[in-house]
Image: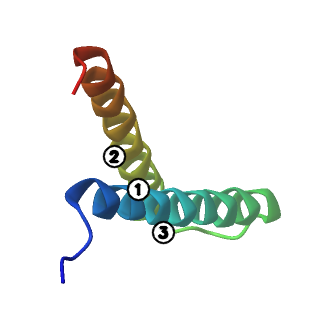
Amino acid sequence: MTGPSRSEILRQVSIAACIVGLATATVYFLARWKGIPVPQWMPMLIAMMGGYELVQWAQALWLKRAGR
């Protein structure tokens, strides 16, 4: 029996990161709108998840263009 392929695992991680990033950004902006103080690490976490997604998208585009 074989396990999931590397591309399937990366796709699942990408989907999870996207969902968590959107949820974190929603909580952050709602808290700021309501005037609730937010931790200083929260914007950095949102930027890190966005950067991860941007790299995954660029890598997929690069591999598609290279014909792999």
Query: Quick one: SS at disc 1?
Result: helix
Mark 3 nearby-residue class (10 Å; few <14, some 14–19, many ≥20): few
Residue of label 3: 39
Q: Are marks 2 and 3 in contact (CB under 8 Å)?
A: no
Residue at horizontal 42 percent and vertical 46 percent from the top = 47
Residue kind at label 2, given as amino acid type: Tyr
| Mark in the foreground, 2 or 3 | 2
Residue of label 1: 14
Residue kind at label 1, given as amino acid type: Ser
Q: Are marks 1 and 2 in contact (CB under 8 Å)?
A: yes
Query: Quick one: SS at disc 3?
Result: loop
Q: Is residue 16 above or below residue 58?
A: below
CA distance separating discs 1 and 2:
8 Å
Residue of label 2: 52
Residue kind at label 3, given as amino acid type: Pro
Query: In the picture, which quadrant includes the N terminus?
Result: bottom left
Q: Is residue 60 above or below residue 7?
A: above
